[in-house]
Amino acid sequence: MKLLLSAFLILIAFSCAPKKKSSDTYFGGEIINPINSYVLLFKNEKLIDTIDLDEKNRFIYKFEENNVEEGLYTFTHRERQYVIIEEGDSILMRLNTLYFDESLVFTGNGAEKNNFLIEMYLVNEDEKDLVSKYYPLEVDDFNHKMDSLRAIKFDEYDDLVSTFELSEHSKDITKSSIDFVYYKFKEVYPYMHKESKTLGELEYLPEDFYAYRKDLNLNDARLSYFGPYLRFLIDHFNNLSYHECKKECGEEINIERSLHFNSHKIKLIDSLVKEKEVRDNLYRYIAYGYLQQGKKNPKANKKFIAMLNKYSKDNIYLDDINDLYASIEKLQKGNTIPKVSLVKANGVITSSKSVIKKNTTYYFWTMNQKNHMKNINNRVKELKEKYPSHNFIGININTDQDKWLNTVKHLKLDEDSQYRCVSFNEISKKFVIDRINKVLIVDENGLIIDGFSDIFNPKYEKTLSSL
């Protein structure tokens, strides 16, 4: 490994010199302030390898010769980012985990397309707040703003493709990092504009407002795991489904929560998307969004999951979707709280059921989010004073016993009411921890009072007052 890494770093050192592209393909780099001792490399969410960091926090992965599946990959070191890898690339990345995306830079063969990709990501993130201020504008003004922002990026794109020799594949991916962001803005504009103006109906749009749709590829396998593409498709099908429903059913609908609306969306995707990976991902996002929004509506959830299993029965994520549905069903009011393994301060393993002595709230915190860690424990301290007869159980979702105990002592928390999960995977699935402010309320017998509350939501405290 050391010899391979040394050879690779020598290769990168001469990367500015003109040379013939090697047939060997590498991905490596350096992590400043590493969180752990490895980097994960994925292709389409399939783990390619767990790549160890050396004593200098560097890593290297060499692909098998003539066996590179070209296209978008992702690498993870707690946070995740994209990298385009093609045959003959020798890509070295460098990042600081304190400023993950902002510090990420690539060198070597194949660096230019990836530096462009991360630059577009950062610019797109910065533009979100700006674009939100444009939604109240009338349609012609909004279009002008969007065209201007898009033109600035395409000037950079034109510089990229005229200066460096990119494959058609890389051109398509880098271009899509611009296009689909702006297509998404166009898809959501009518609804955001309506909301900002408190309008009863959507206003008239010019005929060419969605002109880009005529050239859309809804079945691009190369982009089936690319965030900008998938986020656009979700909003595109939201839009199509809304208008189809308004035309055929004449109903005013809630886009996120309506079972009726989502049935339109499922059927539209079934008719228009045939590429399996794109289709599977779309159904996955729709299912997660719907089930997590409608946790307290078991009858509608049952109908939704039956429809999804009908139209997407060979979905590679179907087991995960059905597991989420089953977990949500088990957290409905009146059910017994699921059994989850917990660790006491003394290291003894117990369970979520065993710690219940009276009406109890389970709340969750992590050492990885310092501000939240302090805020939620301060919130619990206030609630304990207001509701002294109620029991509050803190569950840390990290797995390092010593660090957890040191943090508990530092925060001066009561060790008798603090526990650590044995497995984050187990507790996140059984308790459906989709947000860190989530709490579960149970009675003295372990029967669920509310399985989907939020400790900072006034409705949660209203529930406590009623007990």
Image: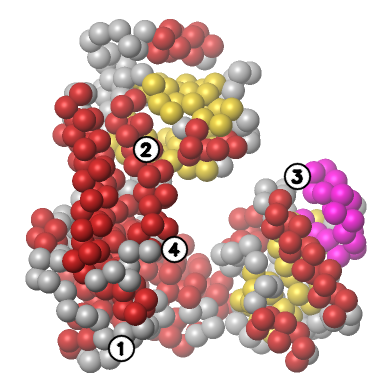
The disc, 4 or 2, on the residue closer to the chain's N-terminal end is 2
The disc, 2 or 1, on the residue closer to the chain's N-terminal end is 2
Q: Report crowding for label 3: few under 14, some 14 to 19, many 20 or more residues within 10 A (C-alpha).
A: few
Residue 198 at x, y percent in the picture: 36, 83
* Point 15% across, 66% down: residue: 209
Q: Nearer the viewer, mark 3 or mark 4?
A: 3
Residue picked out by circle 2? 119
The disc, 2 or 3, on the residue closer to the chain's N-terminal end is 2
* Point 75% across, 44% down: residue: 400
Q: Confirm or deny contact between disc 4 and disc 1 (CB under 8 A).
A: no
Residue 251 at x, y percent in the picture: 27, 91
- Per the model, the C-alpha gap separating discs 4 and 2 is 36 Å
Which residue range is magenta in the image? Answer: 402-421
Q: In what element is the residue under mark 2?
A: helix
Residue picked out by circle 4? 319
Residue picked out by circle 3? 400
